[in-house]
Amino acid sequence: MNENRKNWIGAAIEIIEPFLLRATGDRFEERGRNALAKQLAVCFDQQRPLRLLFPGFPCKSPNSRDKSLGVLPDYGEVMAIQRLDQLGSALADHHAPGCIVTIVSDGTTFNDIVGVDDECREKYNDALRDLCHTHTIVWASLADCLPATDSPAQQRRELLRHAQLPYASIDRLMALGKQDHELAASHDKLCSYLYNDLRLGKQADQSEDQYLEDISTKAWQMMQRGHALNAVLKRAFPDDIRLSVHQYDNAGPKYTVSLQTGLQRPVSPWHMVPVCGLDGPQALRCRNQVDAQKHVLVTYQGRPWLYHQVDDPRALEFEYELQKLPLFGLAVRDPLGKGFDTLSSVLLASLTETFGFVCLSGYAFTDQEAFTRRCEGFGKIYQWKFGAVHVVKPEDEPEGFVHSLEKTPLHWDLSMLPLTHEDVVGNEKFSASKFMLYCKTPPCVGEGQTTIVDGRNVLAKAGLAKVREWARTRVTYFTKMTYFGGNPRSYPLVDTHPFDGRLIFRYQEGSDSALQTFDLNIDDMSTAEQRSILGEVNSLAYDPDCIIEHQWAQDDLVLIDNWLMLHGRLPMTERSRSRELWRIQIY
């Protein structure tokens, strides 16, 4: 093996290893590493894309009491899909021909056995495709691996016929199970799963013995179809590296992958619910493990999306609705009229960090002092010469676009402080961590909306290679019309979050307004090259999946994470000259 080939294979395995889930008796070092190296070597020698195969995402567990939130995908599936795409993207970045991660949504194989009808399974499978943007994921189904059929039931029959298993019937498999301890153990494990996890219902006319016998038969059916699925996938994807959510010893040809960081055992989102903690961590848990008095349910378009931890049971009396996938914007409503003062600053800060921005509808403040007191709980308030509250309202003779009727370009707050500023000296990344906007007087409907861009969605759409290019690209911004007199500042398009190390999107939109110009320049790059890269960046910032135009209503309070989001304003007409927002910045 030449040195270049050997190093490439070693680096590819180093990328894959952190995604593997190991258990007692793991044999990756003993056998799996060499088996994986042989598969990787073929891709290197033939200079063809790396291909990974992951069967999973069948349907939601029908046990919505103990396991799942409902029948449609939720944020748990997003976490798992993004993790598989993260693996594929890292391998694609390592291997010029790229990487393809094929997810075979295999619900047709088992859904009739576990009590999920074909319509529910199809809705789940269809919804998976639209959950999040990926770069290496390709979706497939059982139908793609078999000759054309007219129905799911026929598909299942064709699966068994096409698999050409060494036993012809369930009875034969049961007979083999009496002689094979490994088969018998697998059967018993499936019986436990059907009885304890899915809690398959007992028919009204069934005795307990008949019910248990039915469970046993269904377990044998699942084993038979599982064996058939393996055989069909092996023929349909003969050269793919086989990944699995089930625990294997990683000796090959199957490798167990963790669908979430930090796991000690396999978990699958279709059997669990996603939970966000107050201090940031995201986890998958069984629904019956979630304390209903310490977590609120966040919905998306009327369907359950995730649980979020709270610090006070009074928070359960409010409604929480996600605005855009997968975690972009949260609307909080007070249907019982309890008052938003019952929501702690700790909770609201956590929600803002999770969802990028939070809108509390109908949170009235009598004066700026009351607004300031509410904001004090979030951290240190940035003080301007005019005080803590910046009143953003159109002026008759504005000196810049902020106090005009014109559009305000996308930016982040406190981005143009001079390098000599006391808060910037020794910390060039100094910025507001959050800021609050209170709507004293709204604009007319359809104008003067605050534009909010989710930098996380922008980076997800851009992809790993582009993100790395942007991290190497420093943009110098300059405008004369600033509170501080005009000083150029340079930032990379992608930086690291100062508190948790995540990559963040740092971009400010240019302007050639007669009121205020805002210039962008990239050193050592031609005008054409600058126009190309900044045009691409701006296009992604305004992608419908990445931007929300918040239409203001009186007494809206919006909290925005200044590290994760960009913001701006759409233009207004004279009809909205009374638009008035109050802003406070926190650092």
Image (cartoon, rainbow, N blue to C red):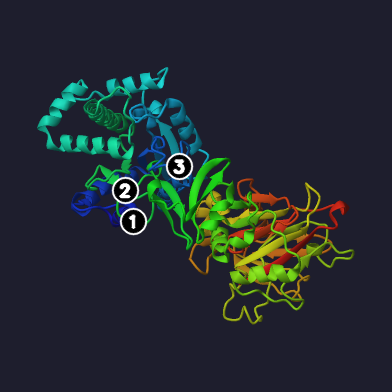
Describe the element under mark 3 as helix, strand or loop: loop
Residue holding disc 3: 69
Relative image position of residue 411 (x, y in whole percent): 68, 62
Dot 2 surroundings within 10 Å: few (below 14), some, or many (20 or more)?
A: some
Name of the residue lying farthest toward the right: 396
Residue holding disc 2: 266
Relative image position of residue 114 (x, y in whole percent): 34, 31
Residue holding disc 1: 18
Q: Quadrant of residue 302?
A: top right
Check disc 1 and give the amino acid type: Pro
Image side of residue 241 versus residue 122, left or right:
left
Task: Confirm or deny contact between disc 3 and disc 1 (CB under 8 A).
Answer: no
- Depth check, mark 2 against mark 3: the one in front is 3
Q: CA distance from mark 1 to mark 2?
A: 14 Å
Question: Image point 69% across, 50% down: which residue?
Answer: 549
How many marks the image carries: the answer is 3
Res. 194 visible in picture: yes
Question: Image point 30% across, 51% down: which residue?
Answer: 265
Relative image position of residue 304 (x, y in whole percent): 51, 43
Q: CA distance from mark 3 to mark 1?
A: 29 Å
Dot 1 surroundings within 10 Å: few (below 14), some, or many (20 or more)?
A: few
Q: Quadrant of residue 555?
A: bottom right
Q: Is tag 2's residue or tag 3's residue first in the polypeptide sequence?
A: 3
Q: On screen, 586 above or below 14?
A: below
Question: Image point 78% across, 47% down: which residue?
Answer: 445
Describe the element under mark 2 as helix, strand or loop: loop
- Depth check, mark 3 against mark 1: the one in front is 3
Check disc 2 and give the amino acid type: Pro
Task: Confirm or deny contact between disc 1 and disc 2 (CB under 8 A).
Answer: no
Q: On screen, 21 above or below 70?
A: below
Check disc 3 and give the amino acid type: Leu
Res. 506 visible in picture: no
